[in-house]
Image (cartoon, rainbow, N blue to C red):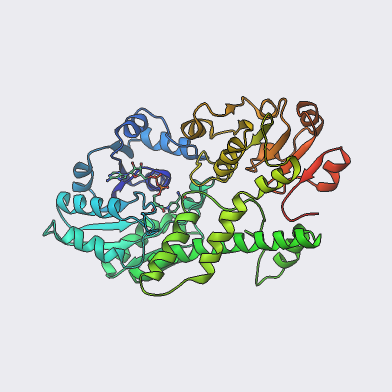
Amino acid sequence: MKIAVVGTGYVGLVVGACFAETGNDVVCVDRDAAKVRMLGRGGIPIYEPGLEEIVRRNRREKRLTFTTKLPDAVRRADVVFIAVGTPTGEDGSADLKHVLGVAREIGRAMSRYTVVVDKSTVPAGTSELVADAIRRETRHPFSVVSNPEFLKQGAAVEDFLKPDRVVIGANDDRAAAIMRDLYRPFTRTGAPVMVMDCASAELCKYAANAMLATRISFMNEIANVCELYGADADKVRQAIGADRRIGSAFLFPGIGYGGSCFPKDVKAIIKFSRDKRYRFRVLEGVEAVNDAQKVRLLQKIDRHFGRSLKGRTFGVWGLSFKPRTDDMREAPAVPIIEGLLKRGAKVRAYDPEAKKVARSIFGNKIYYARHAYDAIKGADALLLVTEWNEFREPDFSRIKRALVKPVIFDGRNQYDPKQVRALGFTYYSIGRP
Ligand code: NAD
């Protein structure tokens, strides 16, 4: 099939590359000319494991090309995916200006029957707005499909190639059949293709993200209560996770969720529920808990050192919102580092992939370390913020030598409290005595 993907970000680039991988002819469109130039030269603008290889291979085989010219790409496409951002608007809603702007451009460029697929995360009812926007611009027949994306950054290629399920919102059989064909190579192993109405498909994505965010905030509150009673959140987690009704995934307490999706999607669902005079109380709580949890390490630091941190230095391990990505959107590292700077401290930070992104946020306000141990050289404490693999089994004697005093604030419960204390560290983690 001939496919155009509009928006070549974390989602669009993965979607485009993976559809090219199964033999389709894919054009990725982005209005960011620098990004398109870089991709055209064989570069990759983001860090995502496995993506570079798959983009290179399909570029070489001429199944994957990049352009800024939406009309050229749309004119020859059977299926056009919209994968542009839906950022939080001023009132908390999902801002649809990019999605609807692209829909209008697609309508103007279409030259025959086209399936327009919304992959961006959008509120229920958006497919009708997309259809209206296209209809105003064209006389050609078209179908609008909602096909929410469930990939996780850090494992995006793997998730797309082997999905748990594919959700397709379609109001007509012709478009649903085309979508089934397109996804067949990825669902051969038995992953279900769930075809439903567009509004339900649109809500699936919000419900999934809201549920996952709820598990995280719930577990963080359990951890906070564990701290009050000297209980161990790790033990509680294992015990409840063994219950098959609950399951063990996504139950790790920490310093809150971040990224471009959970915070934005939780806000959006609260807002579009409120628009219909429904107050989503559970998610209001989820959001409030997360905001507080992001600065929990700072509170522990305040308690240990006192509120003024003038003259102190902190070594931060991990900046991205989670491991295996360079994305720092809504990352807990941001309010933590800002809090340290505000209290007069100096920050030395290390992240395997997010250094460039961090520089665009903090400029020269912090020191960017060359490696993990460089970040803690002469520091008053180590802060573990993102649990990259390389931080899991560190050389504790090297940490001890590098720090002024052996203090660790572990926001991701990576180390065994007994073991690190036996090595002479003062050790703080989340929800563990
Ligand atoms: P992103 O910001 O990484 O990428 C969006 C891209 O769209 C950018 O490259 C931007 O230049 C481009 N763009 C914006 N307006 C355009 C226009 N008018 N014409 C052409 N290109 C345009 O965003 P993302 O993380 O890929 O997310 C895209 C959508 O997918 C969002 O709705 C998001 O909620 C959803 N989603 C994201 C993830 C994720 O893990 N990042 C997972 C599932 C769903």
Please provide percent x and percent y for residue 138.
13, 57
> Which residue: 24% across, 51% down?
101
Q: Is residue 9 above or below residue 351?
A: below
Q: Quadrant of residue 427?
A: top right
Of the pair 298 and 188, the residue shown nearer to us:
298
Please provide percent x and percent y for residue 307.
68, 42
> Which residue: 45% across, 37% down?
46
> Which residue: 67% across, 48% down?
299
Q: Quadrant of residue 298?
A: top right
Question: Residue placed farthest to the bottom in the image?
Answer: 277
**273 lies left or right of 420:** left
Of the pair 383 and 155, the residue shown nearer to us:
383
Q: Is residue 378 above or below residue 308?
A: above
Please provide percent x and percent y for residue 229.
79, 63
Q: Is residue 195 visible?
A: no
Question: Residue placed farthest to the left in the image?
Answer: 139
Q: Is residue 78 above or below residue 168?
A: above
Q: Is residue 351 visible?
A: yes
Of the pair 85 and 428, the residue shown nearer to us:
428
**296 lies left or right of 227:** left
